[in-house]
Amino acid sequence: MTRARNALIDLSATPYYHLIARCVRRAFLCGEDKYSGKNFDHRREWLVERMKLLSSVFAIEIAAYAIMSNHYHLVVKVNKQTALDWSDDDVIKRWYQLYNGDSLVDRYISGEVLDDAAMTFFNEIVSKWRSRLYDISWYMKNLNEFIAKEANKEDNCTGKYWEGRYKSQALLDESALLSCMAYVDLNPIRANMGNTLEESDFTSIQERLLHFKTQIKDNKKTQLNLSQSIPQKDDPAHISQPTELKPFGGEHIAGSIPFSLLDYFELVDWSGRHVHPKKKGYISHSIPRVLVTLNIEETVWLEQVQSFRRQYANFAGSKHALRQQAAKNDVKWYKGAG
């Protein structure tokens, strides 16, 4: 049964969400379409550029993404308090980057002094815009509508482009966040679309790795070899990361993803070599440090990063977290709670 979106997005439970949208037509979102012989890889660029633009406007950060042939994955963090802290002028400026404004707001911008009645309406308008700027549904609505219009224009057709509304999973704890991000970043490896993380085009792990590798080169170091060269220590605070993605930081950066960047590289590389057994390269038999820290068994982890979507429904997390959320929402059970 379809659930109301406000029953699935609960910012009091978690700010992190896994989002998926899938095409409805045989015409591909991107990649090589075997039916038409056309290549639509450029549409991946549309998606990445648009979602990053939206994240610069909305109070929603991108933690991970993967753009596949007929669907895409996003892991985002909603920063509600950030939006609540914006001034009215900040909200107006952000809203006007994407949407038409309002004549009353235009009068305010021009410097006109509004009377009490007009100010009441003005405050209601700005409050509505503010709430929408940390609303996942508005973020996804803008993203999907933009891509649909561009694709339909390119295909010279009209009609539905996306398969219903987007799907969402609330990530209730650190383990769910970490395994979901790895699941998203490993999509091309599982689908045999890439043999290495650096070959996994249009994924956040590729973007993070290339950024890190460029930094290493800038420091006059040699080629990055994940299986041999990742230091077994916390990230130095000075390591730069892609500005348009939510940074990893562990204990070093406030408000960051609560894991070390280098530990995450090690973990996803190790997981990818198990998920893709024919992949060339050395498979370390030592368990990545972050799994030890979170007390996650190797077999449990590998099952999660291969079948995250099948293990959970709209909420993902430990059995305890799922039972708590079910009780909060007055339901008996959530998939994955056991």
Image (cartoon, grey):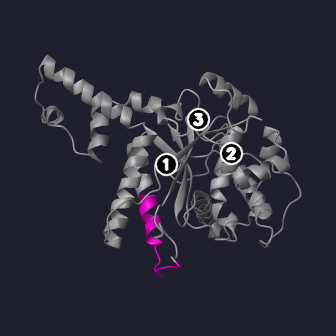
Instruction: Tell me the residue that label 3 is attached to.
Output: 254
Contact, CB < 8 Å: mark 2 with mark 3?
Answer: no
Whether residue 61 is visible to the viewer of this picture, yes or no, is yes
Q: Dot 1 lies on which element?
A: loop
Q: Residues within 10 Å of mark 1 (few under 14, many from 20)?
A: some
The question of residue 38 being in magenta is answered with: yes
The residue drawn where x is 21% and y is 41% is 101
What x and y, as percent, mark residue 172?
64, 34
Between the C-alphas of marks 1 and 3, the distance is: 30 Å
- The magenta stretch is 34-49
The residue drawn where x is 16% and y is 31% is 108
Instruction: Tell me the residue that label 1 is attached to.
Output: 166
Instruction: Tell me the residue that label 2 is attached to.
Output: 178
Q: Say which of 14 and 197 sits in front.
A: 14
Between the C-alphas of marks 2 and 3, the distance is: 18 Å
Q: Residues within 10 Å of mark 2 (few under 14, many from 20)?
A: many
Q: Residues within 10 Å of mark 3 (few under 14, many from 20)?
A: few
* Amino acid type indicated by mark 1: Tyr
Whether residue 221 is visible to the viewer of this picture, yes or no, is no
Q: Say which of 96 and 302 sits in front.
A: 302
Q: Say which of 243 and 95 sits in front.
A: 95
The residue drawn where x is 58% and y is 57% is 204
